[in-house]
Image (cartoon, rainbow, N blue to C red):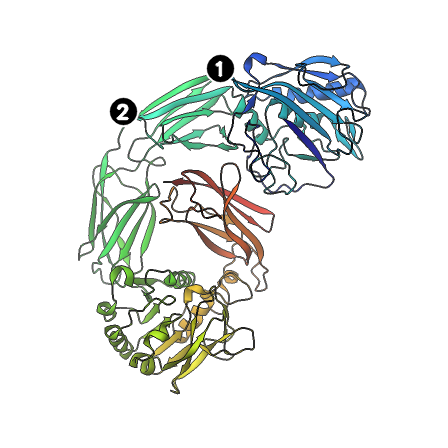
Amino acid sequence: MQKKLLAILFSLALFLSLSAFCLLRSSGVANNGQTRCCSGLVQWWHPSTQPVRILIDEAGSPQAAGALTHNAIRAAMNTWNQVRSSYFRFADGGLTSQKTISGSDGKNIILFDRDGTNFPQGANALAFSRTFTVTDNLGYRAVDSDLVYNSRDWRFEINPAGNAFDIQAIATHELGHHLGLDHAGGGRDINDASTGCGPVVPAATMYYAVGFRNTSTRSLALDDIAGITAIYPKWTIAGAVFDNRTGQPFLNATIELQGTQSPLDTILVSSINTGQTGFFTLPLLDSIATVSFCQFGYQSNSTTVQFATPEIKQVLLGMEPLPLGELTGRIFDQNNAAGIEAEIILYAEGKELRRVASAIDGRYSMPSLPASNLPCSGYDRIEVRPLLNYAPVMVDSIQVNAGAPTELNFQLVPAEIAIIDDDGGQNSEAGLAAALSRLKLTSFEWSVAQRGSPAPIIDKLQSRYLLWTTGGATASTLGASETQQLTEFFNRGNHLFLAGARLAAQIESTDFFRNVLHARRIGTTTARIVKGLAGDPIGDGLLIGLLDANEKDVIATDGNPGAVVALQHTNSANDDLGGAGIRFAGAYKAVYFSFDFASILDGNPNLSSSDKILGHVLEWFGLRTGVEARQSPALSEVPQQFQLFSNYPNPFLQTQGSQQTTIKYAVAGPTRKNATASHVLLAVYDLLGRRLATLVDAPQVPGNYAATWNGRTDTGYFVGAGVYFYSLRVGGETRLTKKMIVLE
């Protein structure tokens, strides 16, 4: 196995601090040209062969006296020897006059090749290491490892100047290959980054390239220390966590480390789970570690382990069930204390644990709940979903006490907006709800797919503002009973916003369409741009991009003087392809869009956001919004720093795509209106640093965003259960990374 060190003739930008060490293994090369870091046996030196003795070229570098060269290489050997958490050792084997390397002589030699004896003509690498291995019952073992400096083409000095390289820094890197480390990072992030795995870590000694006069890699980065510890751990704990009552080990129990970290595969971790066996093995970076065990419904347990010599210590901890408690309370109207009927859902460990319904008076009870045991065992959140007129409420980090009931009451106020989700189970209402939230307006949602026709409840709505959304060609439930109730809703002086791409084709013959909306259908279009009419109170200044090219109705007014076309379909800024939006003002106000609201393209600074569009509609209705509607919300409340939040739920239960997890993030920027977009890359990676799924890869203006992932890779396959990372990169400079767990 041969590893080359390349020269970089420019400065390196440090854009990532995530540990990503990589180990040399016996497997082949993957399709992307990279070593498969987490499969195959690890290359190592058996303890019986240690210390690994190194012979040094007696002549040394042409640019440094022999003694100076020898001492620089010995210093590099000592750098690896001083890693406290590893038992690996190099030893000085003396000097040699040998000028060629061989895999059969059992000598580990460091040479300075002055005439190309060991370097092919035209090779421009600074140095290379060649390690010879055998595979037997002791594993994938190194038996001979040599290092050759390319002194024919490059200058190597003790304190390098000009176009020279540091002898000690290069020796430290190459000796890392000798002991079994690969390059830190590979070609996924830098096209010519040679082999290696995981995200690129330029600060690591084991980075694939080095610049002129660079001496920084004489010392090891945490990434390098983690790598040698992973292969040659001095201190290791192994054991299991089990139920004291049954003696059975817990599967997927969480293990936390305090005071140290553990190198696993290509990363450093502070917590793992016991997997499907219930057992664990953890090498450690420190000789003292506190190990804590957490399992929902059980008391936490911990122990402190201290090592005196290189050894493996067994840790077996039993866990006792937590005492039980009860969660009770009442849901009521803040204004009149009237009880509110609702569903109450309690979540723990990223999944639903209990669901109950409140009584007519708003009272609810959840008995026999394990008491909270923070920070080890607690409840993620509780959700209250009122059946009518009130917005859902969510409270994070719920605690349940043992013994006496824990009381948690909810005082609600009527929602300002009512939403009828009438898209046949699609997601057209999501854009409305999200936009209302950013406009700081509360909303109540009625799902037709889950709860049936809204006709029986329209006359019970307390909100004066009703938003009714349909999706695509899905048949609407706007039948005779619904339109009759809507007519009465209008007669009470209330207002309606209606949106749907093919709604007109379904209801154009009804009195409601002609005499209430005062609209008529004149054709269809697949155009993906909608333009607001200048001077119109709704359309003025709007330019809307649509995500899909499906057919949409083209509409016009029926000639009633109160009905006005506010939006038009267009393929450019000038083409008029017919009406896309109508507003009517009389005894009531109605707005009708002939496209799906959820298909509005958000995040483009040249297009109107869904917040701005909805803000125009609601302002015309006479409702004051919490955010200036005529300014993009991404610019009105600009985050002051880049942020990547924990995904929810986490762990994420991936059951063939029926579940998904949400990742929220913030793109920071100036608070001026002409803020420019930055390129945003949000992606999911495995433990090797391989990109599995790209969630966002586009320019975005400063603002708050959310993306979802259903557990599929970019090629359409479902990932398996395990630990994954998601990373946010903005503008090629800022990078943030977090961990998620996927369950099956």
Q: Residue at x 24, y 70 (%)?
A: 455
State the image coordinates of residue 599 (x, y, percent, origin top left). Answer: 44, 64
Question: How packed is label 1: few (under 14 Cα within 10 Å), some, or many (20 or more)?
Answer: few
The amino acid on which the numbered mark 1 sits, given as a three-letter code, is Ala
- Where's the N terminus, which quadrant? top right
Q: Secondary structure at mark 1?
A: loop
Q: Quadrant of residue 68?
A: top right
348 relative to 632, above or below: above
State the image coordinates of residue 602 (x, y, percent, origin top left). Answer: 49, 62
Q: Secondary structure at mark 2?
A: loop
Q: Nearer the viewer, residue 174 or 505?
A: 505
Q: Would residue 691 appear left or right of 281 to someone viewing this image? A: right
Label 1 vs label 2, nearer the camera: 2
Q: Nearer the viewer, residue 194 or 85?
A: 194
424 relative to 583, above or below: above
Q: Quadrant of residue 320?
A: top left
Q: Nearer the viewer, residue 474 or 608?
A: 474
Marks 1 and 2, how far apart in space?
30 Å
**Mark on residue 308?**
1
State the image coordinates of residue 566 (x, y, percent, origin top left). Answer: 45, 78
Q: Would residue 273 appear left or right of 326 to someone viewing this image? A: right
Q: Is residue 642 visible?
A: no
Residue of label 2: 244
Question: How packed is label 2: few (under 14 Cα within 10 Å), some, or many (20 or more)?
Answer: few
The amino acid on which the numbered mark 2 sits, given as a three-letter code, is Asn
316 relative to 602, above or below: above
As drawn, the residue found furthest toward the left would be: 360
Q: Is residue 193 visible?
A: yes
Q: Residue at x 53, y 73 (%)?
A: 571
